[in-house]
Amino acid sequence: MPDAIAPNLPYSGNRTKWALWVVMGIITLSLFTVFEYSNYPNSHDRFWDERYILVPHIVFGLIALLAGPFQFSSRFRQRNLALHRLLGKVYVVSVLIAAPLGFILTLKRPPLLEFAVGVQASLWFLTTIVAFVTARNRQINHHRQWMVRSYAVTFFFVSDRVPFECPFF
Ligand code: HEM
């Protein structure tokens, strides 16, 4: 049974939500500019060998990562629900492409890494599918909850690297 449709939820203007997105944005930008850029010379050969899988994995992973803040914005959704649906479908398709590619990239790695990424890719895939189906069924509260779970896995690409790169850990 569809939940009460959420588009009419009053816009909260929630400062905490903004602060969280700003912090997540700063972490993401610094990790890409510091970690990935400085690490590239060491991984260039591996990157080149796996480019046909790695490049689409990175591109679609980035699309999902960057779509999140728009999709969770109440103001964006209330002003253009059609764009929320469209960008939402782009997000869903991006995850469905990036997740299996991420797992394929670990097939020649140590079994423990392969297992860990296998679990992560399956969670990414499943939470996104459930979130999409609940949107189709107009179960908006469930849709929101499952999209939070899906995006938590999307952001794992960033949060997973923090302990390795953050000088405080
Ligand atoms: C990463 C986050 C999100 C993504 C990728 C996403 C994706 C989508 C997609 C693909 C649809 C269209 C489904 C269809 O074809 O009918 C949709 C509809 C919708 N979503 Fe989201 N969504 C996200 C977050 C949210 C959040 C946080 C809310 C807050 C309540 C929300 C509320 C809605 C509503 C109200 C609809 C329209 C349902 C209708 O068609 O009337 N979404 N979303």
Image: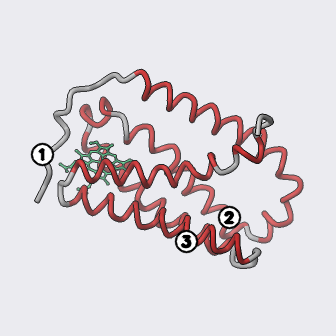
- Position of the C terminus, as image quadrant, is top right
At label 3, the amino acid type is: Pro
| Secondary element at tag 2 | helix
Residue, x 44% and y 38% (percent of image)?
69
Q: Position of residue 109 (x, y in %)?
A: 75, 74
* Closest to the observer, 95 or 140: 140
Q: Position of residue 81 (x, y in %)?
A: 25, 41
Q: How many residues crowd mark 2 within 10 Å: few (<14), some (14–19), many (20+)?
A: some
Q: Marks 2 and 1: which is nearer the front?
A: 1
- The residues bearing labels 3 and 2 have C-alpha atoms spaced at a distance of 11 Å
Q: Position of residue 85 (x, y in %)?
A: 29, 49
* Quarter-of-image position of residue 45: bottom right
Instruction: Name the disc covering residue 54, or none.
Output: 2
* Closest to the observer, 41 or 124: 124
Residue, x 62% and y 46% (percent of image)?
159
Q: Do the residues under discs 3 and 1 have CB atoms within 8 angstroms?
A: no
* Quarter-of-image position of residue 134: bottom left
Q: Which of the marked residues, 3 or 1, is nearer the chain's N terminus? A: 1
| Secondary element at tag 1 | loop
Q: Is mark 2 within 8 Å of ligand 1?
A: no
Q: How many residues crowd mark 3 within 10 Å: few (<14), some (14–19), many (20+)?
A: some
Instruction: Name the disc covering residue 100, or none.
Output: 3
At label 1, the amino acid type is: Ala
Instruction: Name the disc covering residue 4, or none.
Output: 1
- The residues bearing labels 3 and 1 have C-alpha atoms spaced at a distance of 34 Å
Q: Relative to 46, is 23 on the left or the right?
A: left
Q: Which of the marked residues, 2 or 1, is nearer the chain's N terminus? A: 1
* Quarter-of-image position of residue 162: top right
Q: How many residues crowd mark 1 within 10 Å: few (<14), some (14–19), many (20+)?
A: few
* Closest to the observer, 95 or 90: 95
At label 2, the amino acid type is: Leu
| Secondary element at tag 3 | helix
